[in-house]
Image (cartoon, grey):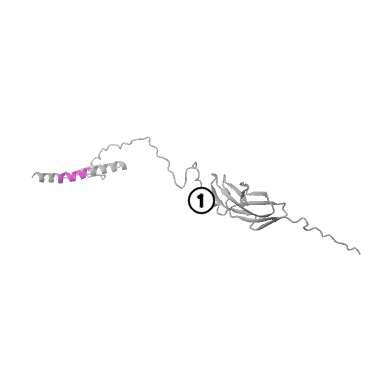
Amino acid sequence: MLNGRRTDNARCHGPAVAAGIAAVVFCFLAVSAGAQVYKVVDEDGNVTYTDQAPPGGAEPMELPDLSVVDTDYVAPPATSDSQPAQDAAPAEPTPRELRKMYSDFKITRPMPEETFWGTANQVVVSWGSSKPLEDGMTVKVYVDGTLQSGDQGGMLALTLDRGEHTVYAELFDARGRRVVTSGSVTFFVKQHSVGFNRPQAVQIARS
């Protein structure tokens, strides 16, 4: 039957195809390894390939040389996330990161409730943080709610009237954004009276 013939043909060609594929793969591996390949045909007509010389002094097969194709492709240099490019600029801290970095920013002088005596109304105000200010950062100082001045030096000399005063400072980043505000400090400026420490006059009673 036709169907039977097709089945028989398929059965016959199946092993042959498989053997052919295996032979090609074997030959390729043998050429890659530089080995000699021998073709052996048994009494039933089955063909096999081997790298072992069969008895009878058979000659090895002549196999074509492998072709090598040169290309201009150059692989890019490997990069590592742990070693970024040297020309990459460091990331700028976010406002939240800056607030965390300078959370201890405060007025360092005067001390709370400190009193200044005999300084000719001169008061030195200073501020700071455990972390040095970054480039471009600025400070504004307010005394009794009035803006005075500020700089990166961390110190400001003022002449104030006698009495009670308050001072606080604001820290700004390089873009002019306020990062943090220090706590307010109350202090006093006092001067000795005109008659302070003056010898008392001695009245001499007339006899």
Image x and y of residue 7, in percent: 13, 46
Q: Label 1, on which residue?
A: 97
Does residue 59 lie above or below 162 as drawn? Answer: above
Residue at the farthest left position = 1
Q: In this view, does 124 lie to the left or right of 13?
A: right
Q: In this view, does 100 lie to the left or right of 51?
A: right
Image x and y of residue 195, in percent: 78, 57
Front residue of this view, candidates 173 and 66 = 173
Residue at the farthest front position = 206
Image x and y of residue 175, in percent: 53, 44
Residue at the image point whose x is 18% and y is 45% from the top: 14
Residues shaded magenta = 10-20
Magenta run includes residue 13: yes
Q: Is residue 15 left or right of residue 188?
A: left
Front residue of this view, candidates 3 and 14 = 3
Q: How would you rate the neighbour count of disc 1 (Cα within 10 Å): few for under 14, some for 14-19, many for 20 or more?
A: few
Going by the numbered disc 1, the residue's amino acid type is Glu
Front residue of this view, candidates 143 and 14 = 143
> How many marks are shown on the rendered structure?
1
Residue at the image point whose x is 24% and y is 43% from the top: 23
Chief SS of the magenta region: helix
Quarter that holds the C terminus: bottom right
Magenta run includes residue 47: no
Image x and y of residue 54, in percent: 23, 44
Q: Can residue 56 be seen in this view?
A: no
